Each structure stands twice: as C-alpha cells, then as structure tokens.
Amino acid sequence: MDRVLNQRIERGMTRVRDTPDLGKDGLSEPMQSVYDDIERTLRVPFVNFIFRTLANFPDYFVPAWQALSPHLRQVACERAGDRLRSLAAHEITVEPLAKDILSMEDQSAIVAFTDAIHYVLPKLLLTVTAFDKQASGDFLFSPVPTTGDAALLPYGIAQGTGKLPLLDPADADARLRSLFQDIQDQHGHPGVASYYRGLGQYPVFLGQVWQEVRRHIDTDSYRQRKQSVLTLAESLADRELVRHAPAPMAAAPEAVREILAVFRTRLIPDLLLDVTLIQAMLGDPQAAAYSRFSISD
C-alpha cells in the first residue's frame, strides 16, 4: 500500500467517525427514493453503512449510484459477487458454536440477518471499489458493449432476507461496550460495523462468535485471503462496473475519496471475512462459500 493511500486512509478514519450516519428517517423524499432503490437493487432490506455515509454528499453520491446501479442488477455482477464470496471462504476452519445458547426464534432472526449481510457484502465491495476507481481516475475509460450475460436480477428484496435493529454503542451496557470496543480496536476501524451492532441485540451470541473471529484476524491466512479478495474485487469491479458506467461521473470531493478508501480497504473486506467465518460457524465452511439468495445460473 503506497504512502498516498495510507495518508488518505488515515484521514478517512477521522472523516468516517465525524460524518453523520444518515438513516432513512429525516431524509428528503428524493434521497429516500435512492435508499429504496439501493435496497431493491441489492435485494436486501436495509441500506448499508457505506451508503448512509455517502448520502452526506448527494451531489456526488446520487449520480454515482445511478451510473452503477443498472450494472449491479445484472447476473454478471451477481456471478462476480459469488466469486468473491467463494474466495473469502477458501480453506477456512472454525470452532463450532456452543449449542442451546439461543431460542429457535432468536436463531432464525440471526440467521436471516447474517445470510442477508453475507449475500450483499461482495456486492458492496464491488460497488465501493468501482466508486473509488471512478473517483480517483484510476482506470482507462473505454466503454465496452455488454457481450456476456446481460440478464437482470429480480428488482426487489429477496424473500428470506432479514434485518435487525442496530444498537447504538452509546446505549450498550458496560460489558457490551467493551466488546464493541474490542471489535473496533482489533480491526482498527473508525466505528463498529452495522452487522455487529445488530448482533448486539444478542450479546451472549455476539461474544461467542467474536471470540472465534478474533483469533483469526491476526493470522497469515486471514491477511492473505483479504489481499486476494481485494485484488479480485479490483479486477471484477473494473470489468463489470467501471468500464460500463457512463463517464465522466460527478467529481468526487477529497472527503469522499478519503471515505471510500476506508470502506474499500478496511471496513467492507474485513467484515466480509468476519461474516464468512460466522456463516461457517452457523453452518459449515463449505456453506460459507455460497449464498442461498444468489441467482447466477
């Protein structure tokens, strides 16, 4: 990682911490429509942290999203996400979860939420990589006619996906705040990822899965898989998104470039690897390589 990128990430860490996290409530009607489009395009019942942050820069974000979203709906992009998901699960081994720590109802809610996050994370990595490449000009724009599969995914939230209310770390008790802080510190993140905030509703479960995820983070296997995922995401985002999107897109302010660098290199790939490990704990390592919501055949 070069010096300029490291400096951009360092500034971006502060930027992400200081930028409001914009939920749908209180947004203008046009931005609410963008949020609705994000959910239906990505087929999940929530708007992820990357978009809730970029919504603070509507002059950049709205045209950038509108340029990429039609390509995110293509089956070819779904297949690209499948490849990233499979790579994130390559040769992982995890300790099984203790039994009977959850009721059947709670387990069903956690599984639906985890399955939805696991499904969307590769697409988020493709999206933020494409945004970042467009914002930096780090590509040669040469519109390529679609020669592969231009079939479209269903436009709407996939049946069986779920969401959980996100717990504000400030509202957590002392034990859970300590757990959130450890998650943040181990990853060097500017805040607690939305997925973990959702699992904060089930602190016993969160504590157990985090204990297992934590022992993987500072390992060669984790670092190598992360680098492989980042490299593949760059190639796939260029092929399936950047070269097809209209150019030039709206110019990105430096603040946006700093935010994109953090999500592209830290928040999204780290969470993809973490959730893959948790999927393996909920099912098995082979199942963690796939998503039941993917439509790529």
Image: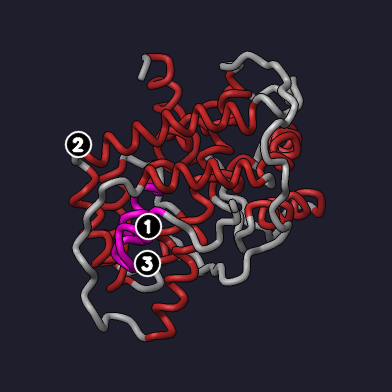
Q: Residue at x 18, y 51 (%)?
A: 215
At a point 47% along the width and 75% down the height, the residue shown is 109
Instruction: Looking at the picture, tell me which residue is in the foreground, 216 or 234.
Output: 234
Label 3, residues with CA under 10 Å away: few <14, some 14-19, many ≥20:
some
The reply, left or right, for residue 105 in relation to residue 44 is left
Q: Which residue is mark 1?
A: 288
Magenta stretch: includes residue 159: no
Which amino acid, mark 1? Ala
**Camera-side mark, 3 or 2:** 2
Q: Is residue 101 left or right of residue 48?
A: left
Select label 2 or label 1 by which is in front.
1
Q: Looking at the figure, which quarter contains the N terminus?
A: top left
Q: Which of the 4 quarters of the picture holds residue 104?
A: bottom left
In the image, is 234 to the left or to the right of 6? right
Tell me if label 2 and label 1 are in contact, CB under 8 Å: no
- Residue 172 got which mark? 3
Residue at the image position 49 percent from the left and 49 percent from the top: 121
Q: Of callouts 2 and 1, which one flags the residue occurring earlier in the amino acid sequence?
A: 2
The span shown in magenta is: 271-289
**Circle 2 sits on which residue?**
220
Q: Amino acid at mark 3?
A: Ala
Q: CA distance from mark 2 to mark 1?
A: 20 Å
The Cα atoms of the two marked residues, 3 and 2, are separated by: 33 Å
Q: Position of residue 14 (x, y in %)?
A: 44, 34
Residue 87 placement: quadrant: top left
Q: Amino acid at mark 2?
A: Asp
- Tell me if residue 287 is in the magenta stretch: yes
Residue ID at (75%, 54%): 32
